[in-house]
Image (tube, rainbow, N blue to C red):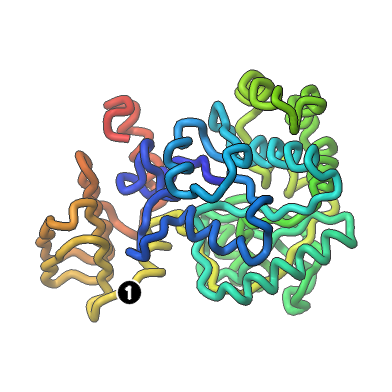
Amino acid sequence: MSGGIGSRFWPYSRTDRPKQFIDFFGTGRSLLQMSYDRILPLVDPENVIVVTNEVYAPLVAEQLPEVKPENILYEPARRNTAPCIAWAAHHIAALDPEASMIVAPSDHIITREREFEHSIAAGFDFVESHDALLTLGIKPTRPETGYGYIQVADPDAGGIVKVKTFTEKPDIELARVFLESGEFFWNSGIFIWTARAILDALRRCSPDLARVFDLGSKKFGTPAEQAFIDEAFPTCPSISIDYAVMEKAPNVYVETVSFGWSDLGTWRSLYENSPKNPDGNVTQNCNVMAGDSERCIFAVADSDKLVVVRGLKDYIIADSDDVLLIHPLDSEQRIRQVVTSVEERFGGKYL
């Protein structure tokens, strides 16, 4: 999945070049390219499907020239993850009704890739022998409000266990309760299931959404598919797969994993995954002179720019083209509200 805007990373992530197309760590590979590389030991390159927004067609083609053009699905509108997954599942089922799928966002960091490969292989074995929707669960380290939480009956069981409850993005008080209980895992947003299982679940749990795609069931895998999607996809409700299916389905399981996962969705996650100087500061693509400043992240699109600050603690300083953001790191969840306010006042000029 590679169609998001990444508004929580604004202004580094912009509408014309969202975060999945950015090389954050100077490796020469963007987050999308790193996600593609990570999947190759598990999935034949011929079977890698990229779902993105149609405006990003040139970026995807530029960054993933190995992917066949017919394996890139272009959404005509942004409708969150459930319609994206529904389309991909129908497309895959038309090619192979017995197919299994791994659904992976394009903006994650995974540091222990061999362990990732073992976990995914175990997940495929499970869904191919059970009627199950499998998500990968991460032991939480803080009361994060930006993730979904998965409760299990026996948090010490390990392996693959039945989900007791599934709660999408709680408030801070509830997130603290979840963390302290020890019964909850973060939902990584990485899912494994058969195409048949997820399509059946969509029909049971989100029939209005499922009906949109079922009306075109004969067109998937044919030259008529894109024309149908261009007409039907914008009529879908904008809803995540978590709300549409995972909170409702009776056959949801979680595989508890530990492979160095991070959703690189926020400035905090970038800070935590970047090397730091003795003052705990992180610099991305810039030179910095920081006096009496600690635990800050400096990210500048222009590598020749010098940033000089004094007396800042726990701040984001992000400079990208025509926008300079100076914002407390501890309240970074409000950046989405800032983006909304900017859009209301200036239209799309600074987005």
Secondary element under disc 1, as helix, strand or loop, is: loop
Instruction: Write down the quadrant of residue 26 in the picture.
Output: bottom left
Residue 290 shown left or right of residue 100 in the figure? left
Looking at the picture, how far across and down is residue 333, in whole percent? Answer: 41, 50
Name, please, the residue furthest toward the top: 231
Looking at the picture, how far across and down is residue 190, in whole percent? Answer: 64, 57
Q: Residues within 10 Å of mark 1 (few under 14, many from 20)?
A: few
Instruction: Write down the quadrant of residue 321 in the picture.
Output: top left
Q: Answer above or below: position of 289 versus 201.
A: below
Residue 157 shown left or right of residue 266 in the figure? right
Residue at which label 1 appears: 275
Please name the residue shown 64% across and 51% down the image: 48
Looking at the picture, how far across and down is residue 174, in whole percent? Answer: 59, 58
Instruction: Write down the quadrant of residue 137 in the picture.
Output: bottom right
Name the quadrant of the C terminus.
top left
Q: Answer above or below: position of 79 versus 109.
A: above
Please name the residue shown 80% across and 31% down the image: 207
Q: Answer above or below: position of 78 versus 323.
A: above
Please name the residue shown 30% across and 45% down the image: 11
Compare residues 56 and 154 and report the one nearer the observer. 56
Please name the residue shown 34% across and 29% down the image: 343
Residue 37 shown left or right of residue 221 in the figure? left
Compare residues 152 and 124 and report the one nearer the observer. 124
Please state which amino acid type lies under the numbered disc 1: Pro
Compare residues 126 and 93 and report the one nearer the observer. 93
